[in-house]
Amino acid sequence: MKLASLRIITENIEQSVQFYEKVMGVKAQWYTEDFAELKTSTITIAIGSTRTMKMFGSEHLTESKGATPTIIEFLVSNVDAEYERIKTLTNKIVQEPTTMPWGNRSLLFCDPDGNLINFFTPVSVEALQKFS
């Protein structure tokens, strides 16, 4: 089994796609007005409008009900430098760069829909070994 992508469902697809283009530094490929993908060598973030849920025969609730238990995580080379860039894109910073007990320096922020995003950089010897 291979994880193919992570899909975000949103009411405002244009806003979400523009946000992720800036955060990830890649241009989205639009397939329809309701579906786009942003690809890197290690992850594909798919973004669909809430209208796409009808194609699955579902009126599934897609509105965020507050904090979500899922965090989208990106390994970055310098989390402190990324913080300077990210804080110009959003005022939804949950945690400024902080060194976590497991050895990663972490920045936690939200996308326009409230989904949590973690940018992290390994800093401890153990974390550096894990991600090298």
Image (cartoon, helix red, strand yellow):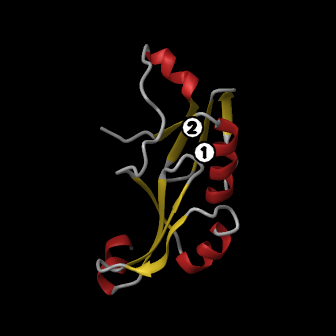
Q: Position of residue 72 (x, y in %)?
A: 45, 54
**Residue 129 falls in image quadrant:** bottom left
Disc tally is 2
Residue positioned 32% across, 73% down in the render? 130
| Three-letter residue code for mark 1 | Leu
Residue at mark 1: 38
Q: Position of residue 101 (x, y in %)?
A: 30, 80
Which class describes the residues within 10 Å of circle 2: few (<14), some (14-19), or many (20+)?
A: many
Q: Would you say 28 lies left or right of 125 here?
A: right
| Three-letter residue code for mark 2 | Ile
Q: Position of residue 112 (x, y in %)?
A: 60, 49
Residue positioned 37% across, 71% down in the render? 131
Q: Residue furthest top?
A: 57
The label shown at residue 19 is none
Which class describes the residues within 10 Å of circle 1: few (<14), some (14-19), or many (20+)?
A: many
Residue positioned 70% across, 47% down in the render? 18
Secondary structure type for disc 2: strand
Q: Would you say 112 lies left or right of 30 here?
A: left
92 w.r.t. 106: above or below: above
Q: Quadrant of the N terminus?
A: top left
Residue at mark 2: 47
Q: Would you say 96 lies left or right of 37 here?
A: left
